[in-house]
Image: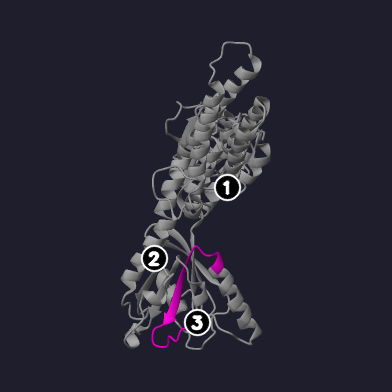
Amino acid sequence: MTGTIFALSSAPGRAGVAVIRVSGSAAAAVYRALSRRALPAARRAVLVRLFEPADGVQIDQRATDGGAGEGAIDEGLAFWFPGPHSYTGEDSVEFQVHGGVAVVAAVLDAIGRVEGTRLAEPGEFTRRAFVSGKIDLTEAEGVIDLIDAETTAQRRQALRQAGGALGAVYDGWRDRLVSVLAHFEAVLDFPDEDLPDDVIDQINRDILRLEEHIAQHLDDNRRGERLRNGVRIAIIGPPNAGKSSLLNMLADRDVAIVSEVAGTTRDVIETHLDLAGLPVTVADTAGIRDSEDAVEAEGVRRARRTADEADLKVLVLDSQGFQGGDGGLDRIDSETIVLMNKIDLGPMPAVSKSAFPTARELFGVSVRTGVGLDEFLCGLTEAVRGLLDVSDAPVITRVRHRASLEDVRLALQKSQLAPLPELAAEDIRLAVRSLGRITGSVDVEDLLDVVFRDFCIGK
């Protein structure tokens, strides 16, 4: 990554204000070329008029007619951040200009005409912050999670991670392993020294304690990953039970077609929702029944697969025509909420939760009139909350974290079984390396493209 990079950091399109970032060794030259001024005080907002860069223009030669001078582009705020005290650790400039499409295009074009500048790649500002040692990889991932957060719970988790809470946990464990490794080295390098008799026992106790902490961290039912990606809820049941109507009610808009004709829904229809600040993805599925129609049969197959892959299931049954049998009953488990719908059409049948012994809860509702829906939504929210981590404790948020921690735990277990201290020490070195790969404290060049590929340009 070379050169001085620049990009629009605010959202593209028409807006009141647009933020344009510049980072690199030519940042000062960009400021001087566009403002025709000397550098301002660091980290202070200054009002500047921006011009197209031109050869031979002297510093402080400015138009005096309110911005209509030759080559004037716009007037806005500018900030000068000398490295290393900037987001990227490099010399940086930030312009806040009017957010018109023509204004932004003209400013970007002007910056690009300054020698040594180029447009930034996606995530390159944050990547440079990592390379400069301003943040670790977990903090960088927290930044993109903050940008992508759609619910309050996601925002809070991402903010903790971007603030270094998760990295601090892993760095602490790595420091403990480095200390263990140092004791191993002392045993191996100075066998004739007067070392304590129980030094190996103490080392093993330290390893066991750390292994227990990592095991507890891993045994989290993937709550952090679920919170980051959203809980998957599958709406299943027989045809015409009210599944699509329930999806439309939850989404508060017409997502799925509702019809009295059985088998209207043939494919899986998904929508993302904010459920009391919690992220969920709700999938409406085809009515589950035996069918000789090839297309409907494929829809039923997909409905069963969606149910099997979901974190939670809502089984919708017609309270007026419930006869037992299939229709999704074989998918009921402890993460299934049974919904007896259409109770507005007549009394609910004499069934209780004992009829569905493995189900989480049973509710009688009318999706059409809204009767019983408040109780159902409370139960659904609590079920989702139980699958997520909404505490302040740092949690695993990505598959790569979990894979590295599994490698650490395996290496620690192998060290306990090693027949020689030399082999045990090597297992500890592998564990240290695996922990370091999470935060980026060891060589991780092969991981960087994976970590930063989902960033937007300008961040």
Residue 315 is one of the magenta-drawn residues: yes
**Regarding mark 1 in the picture, which secondary structure is present there?**
loop
Give the amino acid type for the residue marked by disc 1 in the picture. Phe
Residue 61 pos. (x, y %): 52, 29
Q: Earlier in the sequence, mark 1 or mark 3?
A: 3
Of the residues shown, which amino acid type is indicated by label 2? Answer: Leu
> Whole-Å distance between the Cαs marked 1 and 2?
32 Å
Residue on which disc 3 sits: 238
Q: CA distance from mark 3 to mark 2?
A: 20 Å
The front one of 254 and 437 is 437
Q: Sequence-wise, which precedes: disc 3 or disc 2?
A: 3
What quarter of the picture does the C terminus occupy?
top right
Going by the numbered disc 3, the residue's amino acid type is Pro
In this rendered view, identify the residue nearer to me: 426 or 31. Answer: 426
In the rendered image, the vertical position of residue 9 relative to residue 274, given as above or below:
above
Local crowd at mark 2 within 10 Å, few (<14), some, or many (≥20)? many
Q: Residue at x 54, y 26 (%)?
A: 201
Residue 386 part of the magenta segment: no
Q: Secondary structure at mark 2?
A: helix
Real-space CA distance between mark 1 and mark 3, rounded to the nearest whole angstrom: 42 Å
* Drawn side of residue 86 relative to residue 390, left or right: right
Residue 263: quadrant of the picture: bottom right
Q: Which residues are magenta?
A: 308-326
Q: Identify the mark at residue 455; answer none if there is no mark.
A: 1
- Comparing labels 1 and 3, the label whose residue is closer to the camera: 3
